Amino acid sequence: MKKWFYPLGLVTLIGFAIVFLNLTHEKMIEFDESAANALSGNGFLKLFKIFGDQIVIIIVALILMMFLAFYRKNFRGMLFVLFAVGGGNLLNQVLKKWVERERPDIPHQKDSFSFPSGNAMVGLLYLFTLTYFLTENISSKTTRILIWIGTIVLTLLLGLSRIVSNAHYATDVLAGWMAGYSLFIIVAVWYEWRNRQMSKRITQPE
């Protein structure tokens, strides 16, 4: 990965903390209302909701893990998927129960909280993880960039679909993106560090 991806993960982590600490601030409430009004009734964005469905995420993650296991023999890559997607989902549930923010269209619903958006957070994690491995062995820089641009656009559309559906506030989605990206970078740093360690062991003379 490009080196500037890593400090960006720290920036998004700080951004998540700022949003979290200011959820009830007047400016945040105004931002949520403005975003909801701006996106209201956008049927095109609603189409992308399917990419955040739990069954879609599970199927994609399982296919990716099988691809890494049987085609690439990359068992550490399987752990990457497990830590990013599975760990991200677990972290999202913990954060939701900790914050206990009610959804905009489900008042007093204690079984399904809003902050941060699971679709935005886990959606980013599984899409970025999938793209990470799909582009890992592509030599063409242009092709890698185009694939990543497509992934980023899809991630943004998925998150915006949750605002249009009135299932989340804009700050839920923004926080989900930032938390998801920060976790993705943490897992990527671990994965690449372990790969470097293994390469050193193989190349070192006995």
Image (cartoon, helix red, strand yellow):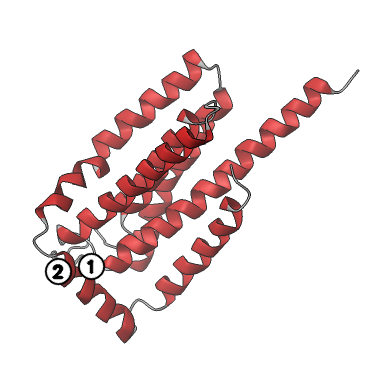
Position of residue 5 measured from the top left corner of the image (x, y, whole percent): 56, 51
Write the residue at 46% across / 74% down.
Answer: 18
In the figure, 106 relative to 50: above or below? below
Quarter of the image where one finds residue 26: bottom left
In the figure, 124 relative to 12: above or below? above
Taking depth in this image into account, of 39 and 166 the one nearest to the observer is 39
Q: Secondary structure at mark 2?
A: loop
Q: Quadrant of the C terminus?
A: top right
Write the residue at 82% across / 22% down.
Answer: 203
Along the horizontal axis of the image, is 67 left or right of 153? right
Earlier-in-chain disc, 1 versus 2? 1
Residue beneath disc 1: 102
Q: Is residue 111 visible?
A: no
Taking depth in this image into account, of 137 and 161 the one nearest to the observer is 137
Q: Are marks 1 and 2 in contact (CB under 8 Å)?
A: yes
Write the residue at 80% across / 25% down.
Answer: 201
Q: Secondary structure at mark 1?
A: loop
Along the horizontal axis of the image, is 1 left or right of 152? right
Q: Amino acid at mark 1?
A: Glu
Residue beneath disc 2: 107
Write the residue at 25% across / 41% down.
Answer: 51
In the figure, 152 relative to 27: above or below? above
Position of residue 47 measured from the top left corner of the image (x, y, whole percent): 15, 45
Q: Amino acid at mark 2?
A: Pro
Position of residue 162 measured from the top left corner of the image (x, y, whole percent): 21, 56
Quarter of the image where one finds residue 25: bottom left
Q: Is residue 153 visible?
A: yes
Q: CA distance from mark 1 to mark 2?
A: 6 Å
Position of residue 39 measured from the top left corner of the image (x, y, whole percent): 17, 64
Q: Quadrant of the N terminus?
A: top right
Packing grade of label 1 (10 A; few <14, some 14-19, many >=20) is many
